Image (cartoon, rainbow, N blue to C red):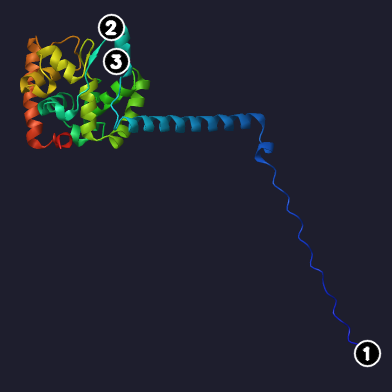
């Protein structure tokens, strides 16, 4: 009997080894590689700057700014300046209401940039419309002077500050770094300088006069006010009472 023939076993073909893709850098020319390098440097530069700004802002949420760029410049020019840091709870409440009424009555209603005020200023063909938050960013972190670069940085940094600091903290820092006369910074030094009292003892009229000399303290006097300053102070005193009554002071008085 013939033996059954065994079927031939087929040997499985090994798949051909895959070719390793060439590295991208080998395909890119020197100009393309240079462009990619520049893009990476710009990207990480922006990340580094933003991270630094965030950390700096976070730091000042619980540490009082020891100085500001403008204060350093004035200290160098005048040899010495006056400033006594004072917590907001040690400042007469009417003082905080007065500066808000004078500089940014809708302070509690916006997130750092008052879009309506900016639009109105543009329609009038005038600058200004800076909120208290913007002024704090400018005074604490940036430089003085009119330039589009500073305004652009200020516009970007202000919402960050609003997100990190409370409204009460913003007002507290504002009152302590604002200039009230040549070389006189902060409400405590200003109260002693003009009226011989502590910031906690300021009357409504005195607080309104201090707010009235902003933002031109070198050209106005709170203790010897001009007719304009007196009229301005009267308006501010009325405005401070208004925002206390309608709730627009609640965000920093709680």
**Residue named by callout 1:** 2
Q: Residues within 10 Å of mark 2 (few under 14, many from 20)?
A: few
**Residue 91 at x, y percent in the picture:** 14, 26
Q: Secondary structure at mark 1?
A: loop
In the rendered structure, find residue 123 and report the number of the disc placed on it: none
In the image shown, does 35 or 87 lie closer to the viewer?
A: 87
* Residue 157 falls left or right of residue 88: right
**Residue 25 at x, y percent in the picture:** 66, 37
Identify the residue at horizontal 25%, vertical 11% (top origin): 81
Image: 253 above or below 196: below
**Residue 28 at x, y percent in the picture:** 66, 35
In the rendered structure, find residue 78 and report the number of the disc placed on it: 2
**Residue 88 at x, y percent in the picture:** 18, 28
Q: Which image quadrant: the N terminus?
A: bottom right
Q: Is residue 144 visible?
A: no
Q: Closer to the observer: label 1 or label 2?
A: 2
Query: In whole angstroms, how far apart are the C-alphas of marks 3 and 2?
Result: 10 Å
* Residue 194 falls left or right of residue 139: left
Residue contact between numbered discs 1 and 2, judged by CB atoms under 8 Å: no
Q: Residues within 10 Å of mark 3 (few under 14, many from 20)?
A: many
Identify the residue at horizontal 30%, vertical 10% (top origin): 75
């Amino acid at each position: 009997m013939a033996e059954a023939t065994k079927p031939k076993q087929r040997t499985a073909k090994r798949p051909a080894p895959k070719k390793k893709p060439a590295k991208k850098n080998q395909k890119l020319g020197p100009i393309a590689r240079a462009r990619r390098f520049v893009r990476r440097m710009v990207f990480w530069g922006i990340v580094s700057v933003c991270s630094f700004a965030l950390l700096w802002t976070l730091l000042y949420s619980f540490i009082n700014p020891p100085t500001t760029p403008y204060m350093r410049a004035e200290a160098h020019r005048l040899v010495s300046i006056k400033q006594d840091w004072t917590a907001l709870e040690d400042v007469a409440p009417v003082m905080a209401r007065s500066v808000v009424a004078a500089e940014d009555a809708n302070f509690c209603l916006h997130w750092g940039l008052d879009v309506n005020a900016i639009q109105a200023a543009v329609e009038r063909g005038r600058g200004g419309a800076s909120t208290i938050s913007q002024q704090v960013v400018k005074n604490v972190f940036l430089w003085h002077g009119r330039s589009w670069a500073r305004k652009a940085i200020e516009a970007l940094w202000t919402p960050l500050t609003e997100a990190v600091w409370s409204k009460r903290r913003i007002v507290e820092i504002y009152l302590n770094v604002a200039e009230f006369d040549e070389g006189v910074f902060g409400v405590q030094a200003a109260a002693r300088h003009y009226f011989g009292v502590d910031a906690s003892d300021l009357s409504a009229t005195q607080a309104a006069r201090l707010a009235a000399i902003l933002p031109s303290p070198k050209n106005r006097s709170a203790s010897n006010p001009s007719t304009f300053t007196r009229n301005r102070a009267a308006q501010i005193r009325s405005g401070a009472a208004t925002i206390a009554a309608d709730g627009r002071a609640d965000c920093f008085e709680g």
